[in-house]
Image (spheres, grey):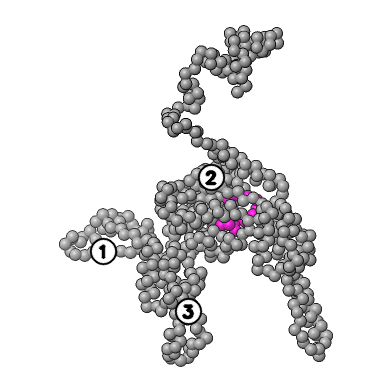
C-alpha cells in the first residue's frame, strides 16, 4: 500500500465487523485513512430496506410497512430480509393443506389467493430477533398491564419514564430536558417488581435485555467488568432498549463492604456499572431498571440523580389492589358465581401478590384434583357395567367453587412479616425526608411584582437586618441573640440571680426597659 503512487488509480477497500482487531499500522493516514461506519439503520432506513425486500412480494392491502419499521428497533438489513422471508413462509404454511407437493405446477387460483398480510409479519416479529442481541436477549415476555393488579401510580410513572421518550421525543425537545435514565424498584419480595419490568418491556416498542445480577460475576480477573461493558455496548447498538437488572443488590452493594471476594470483584463491577451509566449518550435511548428487596445495602452513588434517580417503592397491595390481583390471576379460569372476590380481598390483609397467586393456584389445583377423581370414578362405573348405555354426562366440576377457595385459604400464608414491612416503610420515609423539601417549598409572594430578588450568595438571615431599625428594636434583637449566645458561666450567674429576683427584674439589671416586648421576641 505504501508503494502505490497517487496517480496509479488504485483504491483499496476493506470491510470488517471487528475494527478493533485490525493492526493499528493499517489504520494510519496513507493506508486505510478513511473509516466509514455503516451502523444500524434508523426508522427511515429500515423502511427503505423493507420496501426493497418486499417489492417482489405480493402484499395485502392492509400491510403497514411504516408500523413494521417502527417496531423493528436494532434490526440490520439482514435481519429485515430474514423477517420478510419468515412472513412469506408463514403465508405458505397456511396454504399447505391445499398445495399438492407432488405436482410440478401449482394451480393459478392457489397462487392468486396467497398474499402476505399484517398477521404474517406480526408472527414473524415474534420469532425473529436482532442479530446484535441474539446472544443476550431473552424472548420479550407476553405480559401486559392487565396481568398486574393495582399499582396504578407505579404504572403511570413507568409510562412517563420509559414510554414517553420513545413515543413523544418532541415534547422533551420542546421543554429542553433530557429524559430520565433509570428506575429502581424496591419493596418486599413478591410484590411484582420483576413483573412490572416485563410488562413495560412488552408494552413499549423497545428491545429488552434481562440481566441477572450474579451471572455477571466470573472467576476470571477482569472478565466481570468486560461482561458489563459488553451488555451496555449491545444496549446502545440496539437503542431504544430497556436494560433490566434483577437482584441488583448482588452486584451493587456498598463499596468496601465486600471482604474476601476475590480481590474486590464486586467493587470493580460496580465501578464499571457507574462508569457505563455516566458514559451513555443522551441521543441513545437506553433505560435501566433495577429491582431489589435489599435497598439498604445498595451503594449511594448508584442512587444519585442521573443514574437510578427514580426510586419507586412498591408496597404490599391494599384491598382494591388485592381485588385486582385476584381478578387478574383468575381472568382465564371458570369461577362459580357465588365466589365473592371482595371477601377474599378483605381477608387477605398483609398478603403480597405472590401469596395471592399461590391461593389462586391452590384453588385451581383442588378443582383439577376433584375433576380427575370424578373422571376415574366414571371410568370405573363404565368398566363395571360395560353393557350400559353411554350417556353424555355433564361435567361434574365445571368451575372453581367456594369449597375450593375455602380449602386453599386453610394453607394460605404470609411471606412478608410485620417487622419486614416496618423496615421497608421506615426506609421509604427516610429516603423521602432526605430528598427535597416535600410540600413545604413555596415561592415568596411579591407585592406588585416590584420587589427585587436577593443577590446570589447572600445569606437569608442578612435580609432580616437589611431594613433600618430604630434603637429600641436593635437593642431588643441584640438581647434576644445574647440570650442564645451567653456563655455557660453567665447563664449560671443569671440563674442564681434569677432566684433572688424575678425574670423582669433580671432583664432590667441588663439595662433593658421594654421587658414585655423582649418576652415576645424570645418566645418567637
> Of circles 2 and 1, which is in front?
2
Q: Secondary structure at mark 3?
A: helix
Q: Is residue 114 left or right of residue 360?
A: left
Quadrant position of the C terminus in the picture: top right
Q: Residue at x 50, y 87 (%)?
A: 98
Q: Secondary structure at mark 2?
A: helix
Disc 3: which residue: 91
Q: Residue at x 81, y 89 (%)?
A: 388
Q: Is residue 485 visible?
A: no
> Of circles 3 and 1, which is in front?
3
On the image, the x and y values in percent for residue 228 come to: 49, 53
Q: Secondary structure at mark 1?
A: loop
- Depicted 262 relative to depicted 128: above or below: above
Quadrant position of the N terminus in the picture: bottom left
Q: Earlier in the sequence, mark 2 or mark 3?
A: 3
**Mark 3 near mark 1, Cβ–Cβ under 8 Å?**
no
Q: Is residue 479 left or right of residue 116?
A: right
Disc 1: which residue: 12
Q: Is residue 171 visible?
A: yes
Marks 2 and 3, how far apart at CA? 50 Å
On the image, the x and y values in percent for residue 224 come to: 51, 53
- Residue stretch rendered in magenta on the structure: 185-197
**Mark 2 near mark 1, Cβ–Cβ under 8 Å?**
no
Marks 3 and 1, how far apart at CA? 44 Å
Q: Earlier in the sequence, mark 2 or mark 1?
A: 1
Amino acid at each position: 500500500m505504501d508503494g502505490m503512487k497517487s496517480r496509479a488509480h488504485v483504491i483499496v477497500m476493506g470491510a470488517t465487523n471487528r475494527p478493533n482487531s485490525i493492526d493499528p499500522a493499517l489504520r494510519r493516514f496513507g493506508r486505510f485513512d478513511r473509516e466509514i461506519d455503516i451502523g444500524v439503520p434508523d426508522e427511515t432506513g429500515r423502511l427503505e430496506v423493507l420496501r426493497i425486500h418486499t417489492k417482489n412480494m405480493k402484499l395485502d392491502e392492509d400491510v403497514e410497512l411504516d408500523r413494521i419499521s417502527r417496531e423493528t428497533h436494532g434490526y440490520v438489513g439482514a435481519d429485515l430480509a430474514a423477517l420478510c422471508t419468515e412472513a412469506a413462509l408463514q403465508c405458505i404454511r397456511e396454504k399447505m393443506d391445499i398445495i399438492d407437493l407432488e405436482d410440478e405446477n401449482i394451480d393459478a387460483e392457489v397462487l392468486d389467493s396467497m398474499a402476505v398480510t399484517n398477521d404474517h409479519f406480526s408472527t414473524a416479529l415474534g420469532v425473529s430477533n436482532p442479530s446484535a442481541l441474539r446472544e443476550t436477549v431473552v424472548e420479550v415476555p407476553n405480559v401486559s398491564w392487565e396481568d398486574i393488579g393495582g399499582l396504578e401510580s407505579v404504572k403511570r410513572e413507568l409510562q412517563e419514564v420509559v414510554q414517553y421518550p420513545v413515543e413523544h421525543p418532541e415534547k422533551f425537545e420542546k421543554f429542553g430536558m433530557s429524559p430520565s435514565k433509570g428506575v429502581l424498584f424496591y419493596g418486599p419480595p413478591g410484590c411484582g417488581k420483576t413483573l412490572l419490568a416485563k410488562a413495560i418491556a412488552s408494552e413499549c416498542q423497545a428491545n429488552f435485555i434481562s440481566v441477572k445480577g450474579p451471572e455477571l460475576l466470573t472467576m476470571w480477573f477482569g472478565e466481570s467488568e468486560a461482561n458489563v461493558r459488553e451488555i451496555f455496548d449491545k444496549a446502545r447498538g440496539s437503542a431504544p432498549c430497556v436494560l433490566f437488572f434483577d437482584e441488583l443488590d448482588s452486584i451493587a452493594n456498598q463499596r468496601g463492604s465486600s471482604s474476601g471476594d476475590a480481590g474486590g470483584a464486586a467493587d470493580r463491577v460496580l465501578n464499571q456499572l457507574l462508569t457505563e451509566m455516566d458514559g451513555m449518550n443522551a441521543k441513545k435511548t437506553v433505560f435501566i431498571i433495577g429491582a431489589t428487596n435489599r435497598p439498604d445495602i445498595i451503594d449511594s452513588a448508584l442512587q444519585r440523580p442521573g443514574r437510578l434517580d427514580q426510586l419507586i417503592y412498591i408496597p404490599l397491595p391494599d384491598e382494591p389492589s388485592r381485588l385486582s390481583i385476584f381478578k387478574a390471576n383468575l381472568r382465564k379460569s371458570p369461577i362459580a358465581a357465588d365466589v365473592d372476590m371482595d371477601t377474599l380481598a378483605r381477608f387477605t390483609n398483609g398478603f403480597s401478590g405472590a401469596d395471592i397467586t399461590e391461593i389462586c393456584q391452590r384453588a385451581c389445583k383442588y378443582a383439577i384434583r376433584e375433576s380427575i377423581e370424578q373422571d376415574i370414578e366414571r371410568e370405573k362405573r363404565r368398566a363395571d357395567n360395560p353393557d350400559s348405555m353411554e350417556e353424555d354426562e355433564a361435567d361434574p366440576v365445571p368451575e372453581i367453587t367456594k369449597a375450593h377457595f375455602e380449602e386453599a385459604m386453610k394453607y394460605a400464608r404470609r411471606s412478608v412479616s410485620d417487622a419486614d414491612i416496618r423496615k421497608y416503610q421506615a426506609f421509604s420515609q427516610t429516603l423521602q425526608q432526605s430528598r427535597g423539601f416535600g410540600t413545604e417549598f413555596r415561592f415568596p409572594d411579591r407585592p406588585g411584582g416590584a420587589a427585587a430578588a436577593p443577590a446570589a450568595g447572600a445569606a437569608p438571615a442578612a435580609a432580616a437586618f437589611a431594613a433600618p431599625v430604630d434603637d429600641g428594636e436593635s437593642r431588643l434583637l441584640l438581647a434576644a441573640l445574647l440570650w442564645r449566645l451567653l456563655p455557660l458561666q453567665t447563664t449560671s450567674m443569671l440563674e442564681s440571680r434569677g432566684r433572688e429576683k424575678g425574670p423582669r427584674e433580671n432583664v432590667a439589671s441588663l439595662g433593658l426597659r421594654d421587658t414585655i416586648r423582649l418576652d415576645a421576641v424570645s418566645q418567637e
